[in-house]
Image (cartoon, grey):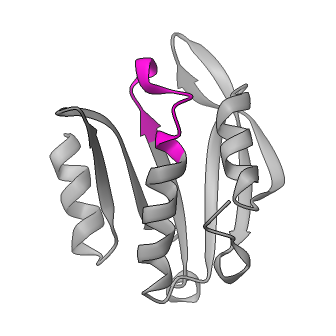
Amino acid sequence: LLWTRVSAVQNKGLPWLVLEHASEIVGYAYAAPWKERSAYRFSVESSVYLSPKRTGGGFGKELYQALFTRLREGETHVIIAGIALPNPASVALHERFGFRACGVFRQVGFKFDRWVDVGYWELVLDQCELDK
């Protein structure tokens, strides 16, 4: 299932990055199309995932710096991020890069046997400071 998702992203010409540390995969980040219609072709949704034992070590920042650098090389204008709430570490990571909160959808996700709210953040890519 994961490789199907990786292939779908890469077949759209978008990056899927994996980070290794000490011969161990610690996380991955990717960008997927925001919506399929042509009007949204310059917008993507970003996702970053880290091994639970590897949070707080700067790996999320490293993955996003690499991802956003790759996206700048293409035609991406806006990045949307959906964050299952509450998740203060992910919110802090996104806001560090300049993402701005733009809304919350109530109980649209189902994780860990419960309904979760999903907050959405947006970033105009050319306004992002990658070296923060």
Residue depicted at x 16% and y 33%:
23
Vertical placement of 80 versus 95: above or below? below
Please name the residue shown 51% across and 69% down the image.
Answer: 68
Foreground pick, 84 / 53: 53
Residue 27 in the image, given as x and y percentages of width and height: 36, 38
Residue 25, x across and y down, in percent: 25, 35
- The residue nearer to you, when weighing 35 against 52, is 52
Q: Is 34 above or below relative to 102?
A: below
Q: Residue at x 73, y 25 (%)?
A: 86
Q: Quadrant of the C terminus?
A: bottom right
* Residue 39, image x, y percentages: 58, 88
**From which residue to which does the magenta span run?**
49-60
Residue 82 lies, with reference to residue 115, above or below; the image says below
Q: Residue at x 23, y 55 (%)?
A: 6
Relative to residue 122, is residue 4 drawn left or right?
Answer: left
Judged left or right of residue 93, residue 18 is left
Could one spot residue 64 in this view of the protein?
yes
Camera sees residue 33 = no
Left or right, 112 with reference to 89: left
Q: Position of residue 51 (x, y in %)?
A: 39, 26
